[in-house]
Amino acid sequence: MTTDAAARSYSIKEAAALTGLPASTLRYYEQVGVVAPVNRGASSGHRVYDEGDLDQLMWVSCLAATGMSIGDMRVYMDNNRLGAEAAADQQRLLEDQQVRLAAEAEALVLRQRYVDLKITYWQAVREGDTDRSEQISRSARELADELRAVTHD
């Protein structure tokens, strides 16, 4: 819905389409305090999003895409409203997320190596190469132990 060209407003359906977030997620983020409460239409009581709301939702969408927790997103968005005085906290939050992502990337590489080994194992089994399949099986067990250690930290 449009009020005028200078002050564009959006329904929840439009906001969902523009941000790529489902309407249920928009409601949830508001409910749990990740985003500030959205204005409501005077007559309908429906949520009415403005450009600032959409900007906020885009930031949250990007944070969610990094796998950041709801709690950390809430802190980040609260700190964002504080500006420069929260810069150190923002940096720490993002550095913590960076560490989590690095651990996830390491685990992903190990999972890929494990799948590669298992493909090679089954190829050796199919070819009847018992020595090679046993050697690969040992390597896969070692890698599985390493993978379990990384994913349980």
Image (tube, helix red, strand yellow):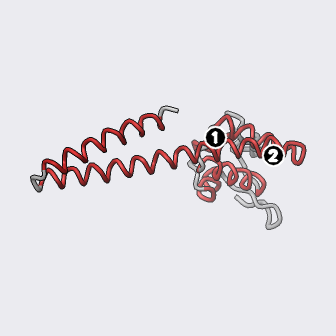
Q: Quadrant of residue 93?
A: top right
Q: Which mark is residue 27?
A: 1
Who's the residue at 11% across and 56% down the image? Answer: 127
Question: Label 2 sits on what residue type?
Answer: Asn
Left or right: 53, with 14 as reference point: right
Q: Which one is nearer the viewer's eye here, 68 or 105?
A: 105
Residue occupying the far left of the picture? 128
Residue 18, position as x, y percentages in the image = 63, 59
At 48% from the left and 38% from the top, the residue drawn is: 150
Q: Position of residue 62 (x, y in %)?
A: 64, 53
Q: Is mark 1 on a helix, strand or loop?
A: helix
Give neighbour class at mark 1: few <14, some 14-19, many 20+ (Cα, 10 Å).
some
Q: Where is residue 111 in the image (x, y as percent from the top left)?
A: 39, 47
The answer to which of 37 and 80 lies nearer the viewer is: 80
Q: Residue drawn at (63%, 44%), measured in percent from left and top? A: 99
Name the front one of labels 1 and 2.
2
Number of numbered markers: 2
